[in-house]
Image (spheres, rainbow, N blue to C red):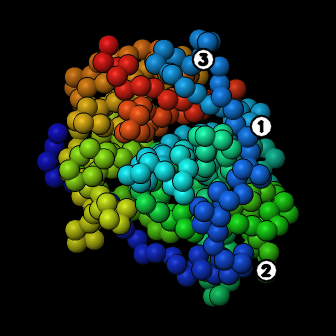
Amino acid sequence: MSESPPIHLKRTDENLGEIDALANVLGGRSGLAGLLDEIDDAGRRGRRAFLGGRLLGRAVDRAFTWDALDRRDPRWWPQGVTTSADASESEAMHGRRLLLVSWYAKERPEDEHGAHGSRISVFDLDTQRYEHVLLVVPRLVDGVLSLDPLHIHAGGMVWLGNYLHVAATARGLMTCSLDDILRVPDFEIGSSRLAVDGERVSSLGYRYVLPVRFAYQAVTEEGEERLRYSFLSLDRTSEPMQVVVGEYGGTTKTRRLARYPLDPTTGLLDDEDGLTKPLGLHQEGAVRMQGAVSAHGTWYLTASNGPWGLGTVYVGEPGAWRRHPWATPMGPEDISWWPSTDRFWSVSEHPRRRWLYSMRRDWFDR
């Protein structure tokens, strides 16, 4: 592990003016609490998945899937996962055990205004009800409000307190406050575009939108290859509490892992002179790793093996990995740890093979 690597994150200014302007058009903020008040009646319905087949992998002990449309949708691809156990020491938010899942959109021939960007899903583990929230970037130029999709891969997330940090690859991290979730009254109008028309917002058909509040921009000093923030997770067992980030890469690309310090009182990265500096950088991640989490000093990595190969989990430390083949479904993505149950949660991305699933940590001790 290299000391004081020349790779940093620089926080931008908050765009509260733009968010306030959008909230004024939409009648105020709903926040996560407002969304959850509606989710049982108006939300989509997931379901438990059957564990008896060969598609889920050897380590999976519990799984859910999306509704029929989301299971097969060729536009939206699930990527990142974080949970209410990351967000709060109580492991619940507003009295609910929740998973948040990020998706990115592939552009489709029918998309007249380009790709739809990225979104998150709020999934209640006990009711299996969920709701999608479109991630947006509001802009205010000469008093005129406009709205753009957030075009990132969204390969991983960390939810801490009210803040949600989303991986943005070469751009660093995008940060939202879940207090800024906004309900769109006429969400079914203008379902093919994202725009503000006077007092009406067209939201690509989404009932809820979440604006980006600020970014942590990736900064790299001369002589160091830029870090790709492909995925991220929370390590509550470290001191100080840390965000773990990593790079997806094949055999010819870097596959680095890094740790950044967090301020648990604010839910934000800890900075010094305007920069958040990594606590160290590991060079020896696994090939095609899609997610990484650290618990009690041990690393756990998910790695993909193409659209039809069951996924692998690597356990140990950089340079000394133990390989657990056929552990996950095809197309495993990000990974998060739930402390009280000692389980990992992850998601799989491929159409008709999409699950939210858990794995017992002690399964990997065998």
Residue 188 appears at what percent x and percent y? 84, 60
Residue drawn at 74 percent across, 36 percent down: 67
Q: Amino acid at mark 1?
A: Leu
Q: Is residue 70 above or below residue 352?
A: below
User: Which residue does the image show at 48% across and 46% down from the upper left?
Assistant: 83
In the displayed structure, does residue 363 sit left or right of residue 321?
A: right
- Separation of disc 2 and disc 1 at Cα? 31 Å
Q: Which residue in the protein does label 1 denote? A: 69
Instruction: Judge from the rendering whether residue 232 lies leftward or rightward of residue 208; answer left or right.
Output: left
* Residue 52 seen: yes
Real-space Cα distance between discs 3 and 1? 21 Å
Check the image and report above or below for 232 versus 20.
above
Quadrant into which the C terminus falls: top left
User: Would you call the spot at circle 1 few (<14 residues within 10 Å), some (14-19), or many (20 or more)?
Assistant: few
10 Å neighbourhood of mark 2: few (<14), some, or many (≥20)?
few
Position of residue 145 relative to residue 295, above or below, is below
Of helix, strand and loop, which one carries label 3?
loop
Position of 158 compared to 3: left or right?
A: right
Q: Are marks 2 and 1 in contact (CB under 8 Å)?
A: no
Question: Which label lies toward us, 2 or 3?
Answer: 3
Q: Earlier in the sequence, mark 2 or mark 1?
A: 1
Residue receiving disc 3? 51
Q: Nearer the viewer, residue 27 or 312?
A: 27
Q: Which residue is mark 2?
A: 199
Give the image location of residue 298, x and y in percent: 25, 31
Residue beneath the point at 24% across and 36% down = 296
Q: Quadrant of residue 36?
A: bottom right
